[in-house]
Amino acid sequence: MINEKLPKIWYGGDYNPEQWDAEVMNEDLRMFKIAGIDVATVNVFSWALSQPNEDTYDFTWLDDIIDRLHANGTYVCLATSTGAHPAWMARKYPDILRVDFEGRKRKFGSRHNSCPNSPTYRKYSERIAERLAERYKNHPALLIWHISNEYGGYCYCDQCAEGFRNWLQARYTTLDHLNKVWNTRFWGHTFYDWAEIVPPNALSEERIEDRSTFQGISLDYRRFMSDSLLDCYKLEYNAIKKHTPELPITTNLMGLYKELDYFKWAKYLDVISWDNYPSFNTPVSLTAMTHDLMRGLKGGQPFMLMEQTPSQQNWQPYNSLKRPGVMKLWSYQAVAHGADTILFFQLRRSVGACEKYHGAVIEHVGHEHTRVFRECAELGSELQSISDKLLDTRINARVGIVYDWENRWAVELSSGPTVALKYVDEVHKYYDALFQQNIQADLISTEDELSNYDIVIAPVMYMVKKGYAQRIEDYVQAGGTFLTTFFSGIVNENDIVTLGGYPGELRNVLGIWAEEIDALFADQHNQIVLNEPFGALKGEYQCGLLCDLIHAEGAEVKAVYAHEFYQGMPVLTVNKFGSGQAWYVASSPEPAFLQGLLANLCKDKGITSPIPPVPGVEVSTRTTKDNHSFLFILNHNDHPTSIELGSFKGTDLISGQPVEVTATLPPKAVMILEK
Ligand code: GLA
Ligand code: ZN
């Protein structure tokens, strides 16, 4: 449980009453009661308000807000406010300002704007976090700490350059070593002095973001920036822990956000929290996958949904309203995947600046008689009655999908073989193929234990880290089913090719050799032809993007290419290795193929769906420690949908009604069946 003070699914969100006249808060507190809101996240962007100058701190305004919330029975998620520095600080100490990708020194403005290697930022952010901890450590309303906000963005200033050089020295010790691992003899890059190394950006190695002329330095800069921001987080974390060792600390992550290695960050978060902003047309399974990734960051521990909008956003090109029922449906989707909180950005709409058209529980009209408020209040009341049962329950997946930030950076920094290869898309294809069959998966890091899973899927495992190939071999040897795809096993942690034939270190376990890799244009395809019908698979399927030209070296060939000069070469292989199997999918296939293939693999391991899949209906199970389970059924369709339950019987937690044989759900409706 995140904090036993509030043993239910927390409900509430970001709240900035300092932006309004004091009386407005009385109305808000009244409405929080109506909506069942019990948590307010405060002080997210108020650094300038609390610290008017170098030596003065004034938290009286915050005392007042926290006390009033407490008197109302509302708990507090207390932010440290360091996501945007004060204007006076930027003027007095310009080292706090970032230098952007184009090499321009920023002026004061916007937010998430501090250089992570700025001595000023580090000193004052740590200091205000400590002041807050000293002041509020015994406040009964305090549930959890929220450090800064959505860490992200890179800086390319001189102090970051200096920090980078130190980071490199610690990692590589000598310049000789660095020259070797970066392969600097290419294009005459040999370094003779650490001071010659400059950050890779538009002024040096990276003309367009994410394409680099030198992957080694670009990869390391990403690691360094992720670490630099993490160091800032840790300074605040440690300052707070001294005063409140028992209170959990988090920072709100951003799901699939590319620039930070969240698996590394997760070690320093007591609980994972994240901000979920799908768009109108985001695939439901992509949101599901992102929740699973966030759950996976801490080995399946329940996470916090820290932000979502009750109705619309302001920062997308087109900010559609969440249709009736959708806010509730997506909230339960988060819970279905392991969230133990449902929090919004924000509780009341801003009056000015860029977020005034961002949705909120309380709209500009200021009263509770709105569609959005009614829907929020309905969910609030449901959570009050059902959520203690769901709290702290887990998801027991038998399929693990490997997700790796460093690999993603390397894949997408790569110059060739195609610009169209997007790591997340390929991971998502495999996730979706399971999702469509109601098979749950965990997203796991390359450090996670493989033997927890019957099947491990590692899409586009381009970078194979030291020791990982051996761990895969051991896993398969012991009976595991491993699957990887085209463009795997190519490089090491420094993006240096493993010589001796692709897929490098994975060649042994896969029993294949990939001789060449063809890149297809967007409208170009090949066909996968099965040698013989294979379980759910028969006939031909489309594939594209990349086609590895492989030779079987002990692996059994299950399917071949239909076209091109590599017609007849293998596209799907399986290698029996020890007591297990290692599969290779040499191209990017259409969904029907992946669904059939994964159905076969799951069947082989006795992994089944709890109820038969129905298009547009998502299913997920959360289970208590003593094996008591709750089946979530989420109807994402715009039409009523009937679901055959087979032998599954249960009572719907939300309506209290027994359900058996067939469940019929109205559009966007949710059932949580207690077995
Ligand atoms: C992010 C931020 C919030 C707010 C929302 C708006 O998640 O953390 O402060 O700006 O976006 O969607
Ligand atoms: Zn900097």
Image (cartoon, grey):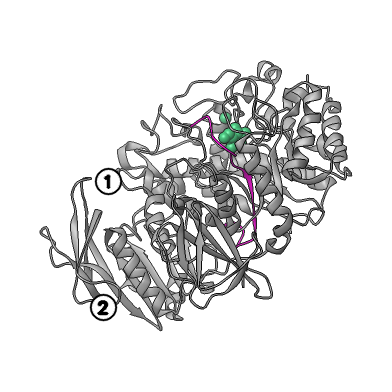
Which mark, residue 79?
Answer: none
Residue 504 placement (x, y as % from top left) = 33, 63
Count of picture labels? 2
Say left or right for 657 vs 471. right
Residue 323 placement (x, y as % from top left) = 51, 41
Residue shown at 54% from the left, 38% from the top? 164
Q: Residues within 10 Å of mark 1 (few under 14, many from 20)?
A: some
Say left or right for 364 vs 532. right
Q: Which residue is mark 2?
A: 554
Residue type for callout 1? Thr
The relative height of residue 343 versus residue 652 in the rendered view (above or below) is: above
Residue type for callout 2? Gly
Say left or right for 198 vs 549. right
Q: Nearer the viewer, residue 619 or 405?
A: 619
Dividing the picture into quadrants, the one containing residue 138 is: top right
Q: Is residue 310 magenta?
A: yes
SS at badge 2:
loop
The relative height of residue 442 versus residue 509 in the rendered view (above or below) is: above
Residue 23 placement (x, y as % from top left) = 81, 24
Which residue appears farthest toward the left when viewing the image? 565
Q: CA distance from mark 1 to mark 2?
A: 29 Å
Residue shown at 47% from the left, 57% from the top? 403
Say left or right for 477 vs 163. left
SS at badge 1:
loop
Q: Nearer the viewer, residue 96 or 333?
A: 333
Q: Nearer the viewer, residue 240 or 19?
A: 19
The answer to whether one can see residue 635 in this image is: yes
Range covered by the magenta-colored residues = 297-316
Mainly helix, strand or loop, the magenta region?
Answer: loop
Which mark, residue 418?
Answer: 1
